[in-house]
Image (cartoon, rainbow, N blue to C red):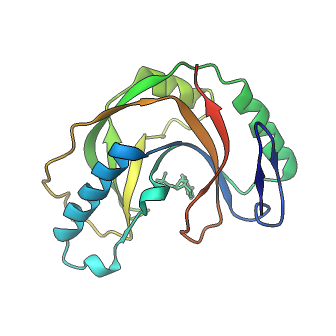
Amino acid sequence: MAVSMLNKVVMDDTTRTGRWFFAIAIEGPIAEKLTELQTRWLTTLRQSDKVRPIIANNLHLTLRFLGPLSDDELSHWQQRSRKICAQSFTLQLANLGYFPRAKTGWIGVKPSTPLTSLAAQLDVSERWQPHISLLRALSADALPELPLPDASWSVNAFYLYHSDGSGTPYQRMQRITLG
Ligand code: 2AM
């Protein structure tokens, strides 16, 4: 099993495969609201059996996708994350959206300068669009008109995640606390 210690992640056979990414975890009341929204969204679909809701434990907002990493690359990103300089900030849920190529339905967040600045410190691409994925394998002609949760929450940390690609809960390997 991979080991997550204070600020040290040790690669093992599990983590030499799979993907790594930095993300903000979505938990507690916000995760509950989004699970309800997933359920409401599913009821609007004709072929809901093919659609895969993201499990509550995996709800997150990706800051920077890293993909598979070598030991040296992991060490590089851990060093980078230790140098992040950012204060806690508030995020607010916004609109629904859809990525046709990824066949993913998501909910966005209201524009946030602290969020953009945090992502910039992780060298996100210009095309980065902050979102929380909710439904995979979704074929959407149009987005449903659903009552959206009016929710805001405080972001005090983000995580270095590892995914083995199987859809089981992502592992949080390192917590990076914001000031
Ligand atoms: P998402 O943020 O849109 O949900 C782990 O695979 C996470 O990294 C997923 O949540 C995924 O999408 C995000 N991600 C971003 N870019 C990716 C890519 N090119 N390939 C796979 N996952 C990617």
Residue at the image point whose x is 26% and y is 65% from the top: 140
Image-based side of 138 in relation to 128, left or right: left
Of 48 and 32, nearer the camera is 32
Residue at the image point whose x is 39% and y is 45% from the top: 28
Residue at the image point whose x is 65% and y is 66% from the top: 164
On the image, the x and y values in percent for residue 102 come to 44, 62
On the image, the x and y values in percent for residue 16 come to 80, 62
Asked which quadrant contains residue 100, the reply is: bottom left
Q: Is residue 107 visible?
A: yes
Query: In the rendered view, would you say 173 is above or below 177?
Result: below
Image-based side of 32 in relation to 87, left or right: left
On the image, the x and y values in percent for residue 98 come to 32, 55
Asked which quadrant contains residue 36, the reply is: bottom left
Residue at the image point whose x is 58% and y is 19% from the top: 179
Of 171 and 111, nearer the camera is 171
On the image, the x and y values in percent for residue 2 come to 77, 58
Q: How many marks?
A: 0
Q: Is residue 122 visible?
A: no
Query: In the rendered view, would you say 107 is above or below 50?
Result: above
Query: In the rendered view, would you say 164 is above or below 178?
Result: below
What is the residue that sits farthest to the right in this orientation?
72
On-image quarter of the N terminus? bottom right
Image-based side of 130 in relation to 169, left or right: left
Query: In the rendered view, would you say 60 is above or below 2?
Result: above
